Image (spheres, helix red, strand yellow):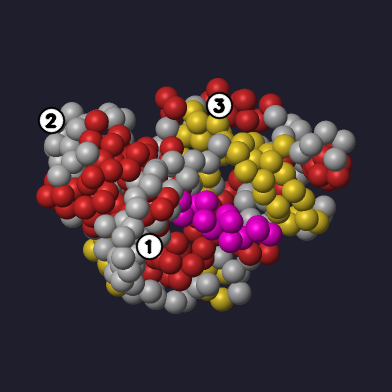
């Protein structure tokens, strides 16, 4: 998955970002000219892609005759369904959402049959397109992703001794994790590796498909999460660089990025492969720490299930390893002090 240079929509990058030999990675100097990942082009392609997936029958429109040339709905059909003029919808689909009202956005969402995640994304794109002083339809705080974790949150994380958990920001940087999570992600995640961008691991590390058993689903989820964040924070330079890096070096990412798919991520089933306990299926729940701009991810297993037994084994092994390390440290004699004569 590494070493391949690919162009991506509106993301311009020159030169390879990373090269790899086996599992060792080296960062190379790079010149980047990355434009914001949310732009008029993103608005246009999002609306066009949602329009193209709807058939007239799904929209309740009766077709007369044959020879329909357009995949999905026509622009004028969307305009009729939304109760706006053809000219106004054409302007919106060209990527010009400036000044659009909340009622028009809601009408568009209904006409295009957007789900909750898509509707939120449309409103985020409109807010990002609005001048700072105009007041967006759904004002949300935006900006750079957080890179710090409050001490109280770290204490909460560390207190969860039987549940693997970690904290990440919106850019997919894992900022903190507890001991059981480090054990579950052994070989992938370690304290000295933090912060670690899990999206880079998924798309640029050849070990990822072995670790994430359902890799395709994981790849879809991470691309969707980054697409949502791009709509919220189009001026986030670090996010733009990350998207450029992934799109340039991963066909799997650039293909998914072009689809403009978005979805909400509250809970999901993940199958991971751990060297000690083998393949394990866990439920991952995402809890938003709204005031911090962070997400708390915790993995659980069904009570009395095989997965719970595997987690218990992993926790026990890790506790024994810690105890042994503590005993070794306690019984190691201190170095003799030299005496001056």
Q: Name the quadrant of the C terminus.
A: top right
Magenta-colored span: 211-224
Q: For numbered disc 1, what is the local secondary structure?
A: loop
Q: Position of residue 44 (x, y in %)?
A: 25, 55
Q: Main secondary structure of the magenta part?
A: helix
Q: Position of residue 96 (x, y in %)?
A: 16, 48
Q: Which mark is residue 153?
A: 3
| Disc on the earlier residue, 2 or 3 | 2
Please name the residue shown 22% across and 46% down the image. 79
Cα–Cα gap, marks 1 and 3 = 36 Å
Whether residue 28 is in magenta: the answer is: no
Mark 1 sits on what residue? 258
Q: Which mark is residue 133?
A: 2
Whether residue 212 is in magenta: the answer is: yes
Vertical position of residue 158 compared to residue 118: above or below: above
- Of badges 2 and 1, nearer the viewer stands 1
| Disc on the earlier residue, 2 or 1 | 2
Q: Position of residue 274 (x, y in %)?
A: 75, 55
Please name the residue shown 45% across and 71% down the image. 251
Towards the viewer: 322 or 93: 93
Cα–Cα gap, marks 2 and 3 = 35 Å
Residue 116 falls in image quadrant = top left
Please name the residue shown 66% across and 30% down the image. 158
Evaluate if marks 2 and 3 touch, with contact meaning CB atoms under 8 Å apart. Answer: no
Vertical position of residue 33 compared to residue 157: above or below: below
Q: For numbered disc 2, what is the local secondary structure?
A: loop
- The crowd level at tag 2 (other Cα within 10 Å; few <14, some 14-19, many 20+) is few
């Amino acid at each position: 998955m590494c070493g391949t240079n690919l162009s991506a929509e509106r993301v311009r990058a020159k030169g390879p970002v990373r090269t790899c030999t086996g599992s060792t990675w080296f960062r190379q100097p790079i010149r980047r000219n990355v434009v914001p990942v949310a732009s008029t082009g993103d608005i246009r392609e999002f609306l066009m892609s949602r329009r193209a997936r709807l058939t007239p029958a799904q929209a309740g429109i009766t077709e007369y005759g044959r020879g329909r040339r357009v995949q999905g709905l026509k622009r004028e059909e969307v305009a009729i369904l939304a109760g706006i003029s053809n000219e106004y919808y054409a302007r919106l689909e060209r990527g010009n959402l400036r000044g659009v009202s909340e009622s028009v956005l809601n009408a568009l969402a209904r006409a295009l049959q957007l789900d909750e995640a898509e509707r939120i994304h449309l409103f985020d794109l409109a807010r990002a397109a609005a001048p700072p002083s105009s007041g967006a339809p759904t004002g949300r705080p935006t900006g750079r992703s957080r890179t710090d974790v409050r001490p109280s949150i770290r204490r909460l994380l560390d207190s969860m001794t039987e549940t693997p958990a970690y904290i990440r920001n919106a850019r997919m940087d894992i900022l903190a994790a507890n001991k059981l999570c480090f054990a579950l992600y052994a070989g992938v995640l370690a304290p000295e590796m933090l912060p670690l961008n899990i999206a880079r691991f998924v798309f640029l590390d050849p070990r990822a498909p072995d670790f994430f058993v359902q890799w395709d689903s994981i790849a879809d989820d991470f691309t969707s999460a980054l697409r949502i964040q791009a709509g919220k924070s189009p001026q986030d330079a670090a996010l733009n660089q990350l998207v450029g890096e992934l799109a340039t070096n991963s066909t799997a990412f650039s293909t998914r990025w072009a689809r403009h798919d978005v979805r909400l991520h509250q809970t999901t089933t993940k199958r991971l492969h751990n060297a000690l306990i083998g393949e394990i299926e866990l439920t991952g729940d995402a809890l938003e720490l709204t005031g911090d701009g962070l997400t708390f991810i915790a993995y659980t297993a069904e009570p009395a299930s095989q997965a719970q037994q595997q987690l218990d084994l992993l926790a026990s092994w890790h506790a024994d390893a810690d105890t042994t390390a503590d005993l070794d440290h306690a019984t190691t004699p201190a170095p003799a002090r030299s005496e001056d004569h």
